[in-house]
Amino acid sequence: MYFIPYNRNLKKFSRQLRNDSTLSEVLLWQELRAGQIEGFKFNRQKPIGRYIVDFYCKKLNLVIEVDGESHYHDDAPIRDGRRQKVLEGLGLSFLRFDDLDVKHNKAFVLSEIYNFIQDWRRSNPPNPL
């Protein structure tokens, strides 16, 4: 287990992002909140290091990002890639979904999340004691 740094200076901004969530983030949060997916607890707009991730599950070491239109222009893909590499360097895994998939193909998105969890369980069997 890695130590995941928390930047208190981002707390206010992360709260603002939660209040100004996109439709896709709200739709996915309705599925992730309150341990609805296999009992795993997710946070939204979670500060990690010098970044804020859309969704985070500590037990799975999983970040879920929902990429809207702004993530595909100018140097945004390059910045997203750098950011992801830094966070993966902390031992985190990533699932990245397009905004339109969350809106129009939520079953696919949820299936990918369930598949990740099943893979995680296979590689992290419960302790028999």
Image (cartoon, rainbow, N blue to C red):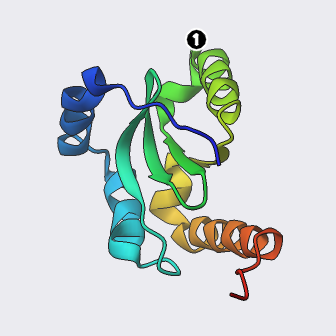
Query: Residue at image x 64%, y 74%?
Result: 114
Badge 1 element: loop
Report how many numbered discs are placed on residues in the image: 1
Q: Does residue 60 sit above or below 61 in this rendering?
A: below
Query: Residue at image x 49%, y 77%?
Result: 37
Residue 86 point in image, percent of width and height: 65, 24
Residue 82 point in image, percent of width and height: 66, 19
**Residue named by callout 1:** 74
Residue 61 point in image, percent of width and height: 60, 52
Q: Amino acid at mark 1?
A: Asp
- Using residue 58 as the reference point, say whether residue 84 is left or right of it: right
Question: Quick one: which residue is furthest to the front in this view?
Answer: 129
Around disc 1, counting alpha carbons within 10 Å, would you say few (fewer than 14), some (14 to 19), or many (20 or more)?
few
Between 113 and 49, the residue placed more toward the observer is 49
Query: Residue at image x 32%, y 52%?
Result: 23
In the rendered image, the quadrant that contains the C terminus is bottom right
- Using residue 129 as the reference point, say whether residue 28 is left or right of it: left
Q: Does residue 122 sit above or below 13 in this rendering?
A: below
- Using residue 26 as the reference point, say whether residue 54 is left or right of it: right
Question: Quick one: which residue is furthest to the top in this view?
Answer: 75
Question: Quick one: which residue is furthest to the bottom in this view?
Answer: 128
Residue 127 point in image, percent of width and height: 71, 80
